Amino acid sequence: MKLLQYGWSLFMVCSFCASVQIMAQTREWKVQKIVERGISCIACLDEQHCVFSGQETQYDDTYIFQTVDGGKTWRKIYADTGIFPKRALPLHSLAWISPDVIVASADSSYIIRSVDGGKTWTKNQIYDGFYYAKPMYFCDSLHGVVFEDKEIANEESSHPLITSDGGATWQHIPGPKEPIEWSQTVIQTGDCIAPGKYIGYTPKLSEYAISRTTDYGKTWDRMFNSFSLPNGTAWYGNFFFLDSMNGWFTLPGKFQKGYGYPMVIARTQNAGKTWDVVFQDTLPMRLGGFQAIAFTDSLHGIGTTSGRICRTTDGGASWSVDSVLLEKGSVTLVAQMKQEPHVVTGGGGLIAYLSEVSSAEQPPPASKGIGEIVVRRIGEYLEINFASEHATPVQVWGDDLQGQRVITERTIAGDPGKGKIRIDIGDLPSGVYFITVQQGKEQRTEGVQIVR
């Protein structure tokens, strides 16, 4: 009897520990408004410590806000009010590279830096021959690069600046030599792969170039229009390197009515020397062009676009929409952390952060609603397959690229398990459409292209 009681007690203790662990691992995204205006850049030291730059009331005001609790609370640690005739310096990039050192790149080639975790700041104009200090990237706590405008307007090469002391001092290195037709272009985005190894992206109308050096700028290799895009302009691209060899590049094209955004995800395993396209899609519902991309390991990654968070579990070969967080169409930034991002920003001064959900906040299992949906065309019908976990009504409708309702909402009875519905599309012309299935408060949307 005593043995039975002991076994039961042990079971209860283990069950309690397991339930506590599961509860601690349960997180959801929460959104709050921090500033009235826009957010220009964000950086995180770890999942608890992050900073972002934004405008609170006027576009001429520049502030840096800091969180030390994973995004729950923020406090202002830097202010440049820009009262006329003084002009505030907008910030282009932020990097929190060690517990004490935070670095920002600003207009007029200024570097703004704190060596006490944001308590005090110094301004240093690292060069007076160009107007902007553009994108800045660090590959560790000491080594970083700033890509900037050309020293002379018609010069054939740009002049990146590098640091090896955490942003205290900077020096020029030679930039990539450019053909005369590229003389007015600049490196728009890039990354610090490793000390002495830098990569940059340059757009030019419907063309683009990826430049890379592995010897502190002594030599550069350039790839022009490396990836075939179905249409549009390669107007921006973003890199993310997990380590000195493995990285990803995302390149969206320009939106075109009735077609969507071409989207390319490419991967390198040799520090950017060669790239393999692992994903290419033309449907804007799923992705729409990543504004940021980050990976936690060789398989698991996150991309943000238009207020949404997308995830991959196979190295970028496929993506799913994890959450719709912020205003639709807003520019969404994610801190480029070497782990899963926990804080993202969106248009209108919004911040989203991951927060643990208490047992009181957790919904019952039945509220999970529908799972992923699959849409396929069968003749003049669309067949929508979905999975439901409880018996509540299911609504189905369809919109076109302009957001107009072209398939009238239909309501069907919901039953636990797999569900299916067919919709007549005989009157729809060729184009891209979005089918939405909603059950309770949860909905899933899938894009489909109809060709006549």
Image (cartoon, helix red, strand yellow):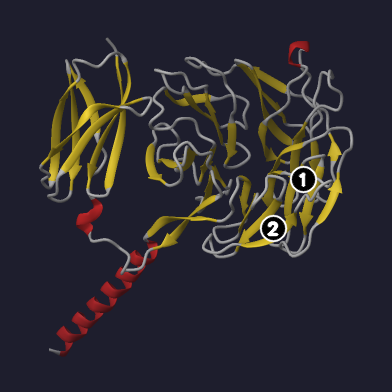
Q: Which quadrant is home to the N terminus?
A: bottom left
> Residue 177's quadrant in the figure?
top right
Q: Which quadrant is home to the C terminus?
A: top left
Q: According to the image, label 1 marks what residue? A: 89
The structure residue drawn at horizontal position 60% and vertical position 47%, both measured from the top left corner, is 37
Q: According to the image, label 2 marks what residue? A: 98
The structure residue drawn at horizontal position 81% and vertical position 37%, both measured from the top left corner, is 161
Q: Is residue 54 above or below residue 274?
A: below
The structure residue drawn at horizontal position 60% and vertical position 42%, both measured from the top left corner, is 243
Left or right relative to 266: residue 424? left
In this view, the residue farthest toward the front is: 84
Q: Is residue 104 above or below residue 287?
A: below
> Is label 2 in contact with label 1 (beta carbons under 8 Å)?
no
Q: Is residue 77 above or below residue 198?
A: below
**Amino acid type at image mark 1:** Leu
Left or right relative to 268: residue 203? right
Residue 218 spot, x, y in % from top left: 81, 27
